[in-house]
Image (spheres, coloured by chain):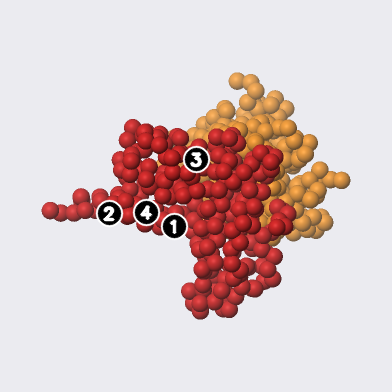
Chain colours: A orange, B red
Amino acid sequence: MSLLNGQIALVTGASRGIGAAIARHFAALGATVAVNYRANAEAARQTVDAIVEAGGSAQAFQADVSDEAQIRAMVAAVLKAHGRIDTLVVNAGIVRDNLAALMPVAEFDEVLQVNLRGAFLSIREVIPAMMEARSGSILTVSSVNADTGGRGQCNYAASKAGLLAITRSLAIELAPKNIRVNALAPGLISTEMTQHLRELAQDELLRRIPMKRFGTAQEVAQAAAFLVSPMASYITGAVLNVSGGLGLQP
Amino acid sequence: MSLKPLQEPMQTTPAHTPVDTPVDSAAVRARVLEIIVRCLDCKPTSLSMNSSLWGELGAESLDMLDIVYSLERAFVIRLPRLNLFQRASNLFGAESVVVNGVITPVGLELMRRSMPEVRAEAFHPNMRIQELRQLVTVESFARIVLRCLAAKAALRCRLCGGLPAPVPDSPMELACAECGGSIDLPSGEELMMGDLVRIGGELGLTQAAARESVQGAPA
């Protein structure tokens, strides 16, 4: 039997990058995946098509995670379609890098709106169904930057650190109802989001990674599958770095 | 009296069949008890309608939320989220109902009339806010559920006056059995608010918003 057989998983920000890799990997392991996207319907369709062509089950659901009404409608739609949500992966996130002195407030706010407020709204909406099921797994996708910080990323790092605080708080809060809450902290992963950074300073970045290479979205997805699976049934409030050792040394 | 299994949806009425059955309060109480047993993971024998959830059964705030969610889905109703005293405090102004953590006499009377399932002597003079939650029993939840069910039973379509019916595959939604128009479930918050306004009015309490607008009006 596959690791996630029969699970219903909702993955936010799953049209591209790490989210799409998680959606595909979960489906390959037997989960039925609700693929959330905000604006790129074509990319979401491609993720769904790839899953279905590989023999899996998936459906796209549009919602801006920072919008309370849209999140509510999306979770209701997923519950209507599948009856329950076993796993929520809070992955939707954006970057608006800039030096703090030059950063418009709007860019700071926008990142927190999506990465932090969006996470809160997504999680809050699935809690009733998971509580009723007496079972559930919530996985947030944070970043090693939550601990290390990053030049030009005060907004992003703050949002990801906040996400860890949400993860730990809710792990405590929801544990009595058998709902586990964990976080992944990816390092530098080869995705569209980090492409510009990797092109700009590849050698410098690789010097900081003990494993001397960037990670892949698939490697993050594998760690995600472990944390939401029954293999991690006694793990809650944990932060799993998927970073090739990035952040371990000064 | 036979009870349905907990996992089974409460409403098994076919799609767009009107919901017009009278509320069987004994069956509702039994089911409320059953749901609370499950939420608190306790033995049915340890619970009665008069059991205090916070005091005797050691319920925590998350358990209360769990109970609310479970009751809502089981009965297809919308329960209030804020507790009664908080709502009263917002409505009539904190100073009207509590002074230095002690509930005022009028605040006490407001609570007593709002929680008729609690014996009157339990609302003692100099009662502190924290003590109120000890008075919440299984029967308190049954009362609120019955209140919401009564409001739901009175629902009619605004467009054609038709009876509400469950929406297929969408357990928390209702639609008109006649014209198919959407019908909102009665809001538990609004019901609680309406009851408080009525009882507060009987006790001569003025709503804080109304008081502020009078105070703010030009001389």
* Callout 2–callout 4 Cβ contact below 8 Å: no
Estimate the x, y position of residue B34 in percent, counting from the top left.
66, 49
The reply, left or right, for residue B132 in relation to residue A194 is left
Reading the image, the residue beneath label 2 is B210
Of labels 2 and 1, earlier in sequence is 1
The chain identifier of the residue carrying mark 4 reads B
Q: Residue at x 54, y 70 (%)?
A: B182
Q: Are marks 4 and 1 on the same chain?
A: yes
Reading the image, the residue beneath label 3 is B135
Of labels 2 and 4, earlier in sequence is 4
- SS state under label 1: helix
Q: Examine the rendering and report whether any part of residue A170 can be seen.
A: no
How far apart marks 4 and 3 lie (CA) works out to 19 Å
Q: Amino acid at mark 3?
A: Leu
The N terminus of chain B: image quadrant? bottom right
Q: Residue at x 65, y 36 (%)?
A: A176
Reading the image, the residue beneath label 4 is B199
Estimate the x, y position of residue A178 in percent, counting from the top left.
68, 39
Q: Residue at x 74, y 59 (%)?
A: A49
Closer to viewer: mark 4 or mark 1? 4
How far apart marks 2 and 4 lie (CA) works out to 16 Å
The chain identifier of the residue carrying mark 2 reads B
Reading the image, the residue beneath label 1 is B190
Q: Which mark is residue A214?
A: none
